[in-house]
Amino acid sequence: MPSNRSIALVALAAALSAPLSAQDPAAAQAAQAQTAAQAAAHAAAKAEHAARMAKEHQHDTAAASPATVPAPSQTVAAEEVAYATLDGKPVRGYLTRPVLAAPATQPLPALLVIQEWWGLNDNVRAMARRFAGEGYLVLAVDLYEGAVATTPEAAMAAMQSAMARPARLTDNLRQAQAYLASQWGATEIGVVGWCFGGGWALETALAIPDGIDAAVMYYGRTQSDSKALAALKAPLLGLFGGKDQGIPVDGVRAMEHELAKLGKNATIVIYPEADHAFANPTGNNYQAGPAEDAWGKTIAFFGQHLKH
């Protein structure tokens, strides 16, 4: 027969292993309330961000003027490819590479290109070909999984739908990185995106720290949580507009401050007179000066970190 001491120890162990609600219902209720409040705050922040983006893009169109989309500096080949599978359905992206730089079997440094809020449209494809002209294997991913918006209202709806499923977006991008590494033997892999894609360029570098070798974010959603930024291993280049109300300068500086505290290799550039989407050849915010300077910085940055 067990002793009283043994019975007491068993009872104590059971009490310690019991759910928090059984030990202290009030504490459990408070914890649940805190979790709910955090979720509500996160949802409100996403909604506010979407509203700011809608305001910044309210006069934009999804079609670029050919005069503002330079042709690739060398001949490139392009094709639609299935690079991921989500819920049993293939996700297709746009793959492009230079045809004269090297035999098709020779590995190249690669780039993941992430769409702006319109989706994987002709403008993003043109930018992918332009990067390919610089000597990269380029995969423009599709985070909207086939949806392409042509109005600001449709773009906002598509972006909000995607942002509601961050784990799915991360899975999409993980598979995209794996596709370049395993199917094409990419020697180094970078990531670049604009607006919605700019924020996800940073998130990709945080989510796949050992698979991304350089990241460039154009006026994307910033991150100032030191715990999240601690995961960053890739060098980061951030390009922002000083007049951007969608991605406020205060948030950019807060992220820059945290990156510096963490000792990360990060370069933040703010063009004082530029607004949101200053590098986007659609709409009214395109500014040739900052856009061309940012392109030069981007190419130099990727050349330094991806070409050896």
Image (spheres, helix red, strand yellow):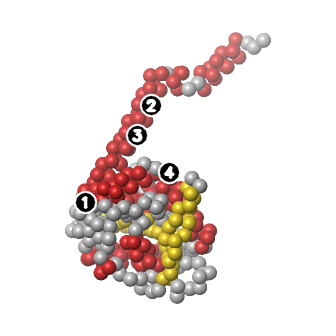
> Which quadrant holds the N terminus?
top right
**Relative to 131, is 57 on the left or the right?**
left
The residue tagged 4 is 167
Residue type highlighted by circle 1: Gln
Q: Distance between the residues labelled 2 and 4?
A: 22 Å
- Is the residue under label 3 in contact with that under label 1 (CB below 8 Å)? no
Residue type highlighted by circle 3: Ala
Residue type highlighted by circle 2: Gln
* Residue beneath the point at 33% across and 44% down: 44
- Is the residue under label 3 in contact with that under label 4 (CB below 8 Å)? no
| Rendered image quadrant of residue 201 | bottom left
- Is the residue under label 1 in contact with that under label 4 (CB below 8 Å)? no
Residue closest to the eye, 201 or 43: 43
The tag earlier along the polypeptide, 4 or 3, is 3
Which mark is in front, 4 or 1?
Answer: 1
**Mark 1: which secondary structure?**
loop
* Residue beneath the point at 42% across and 48% down: 164
Residue closest to the eye, 109 or 194: 194
Q: How far apart are marks 1 and 3 (CA)?
A: 28 Å
- Is the residue under label 2 in contact with that under label 3 (CB below 8 Å)? no
**Mark 4: which secondary structure?**
helix
- Is the residue under label 1 in contact with that under label 2 (CB below 8 Å)? no
The residue tagged 2 is 32
The residue tagged 1 is 58
The residue tagged 3 is 39
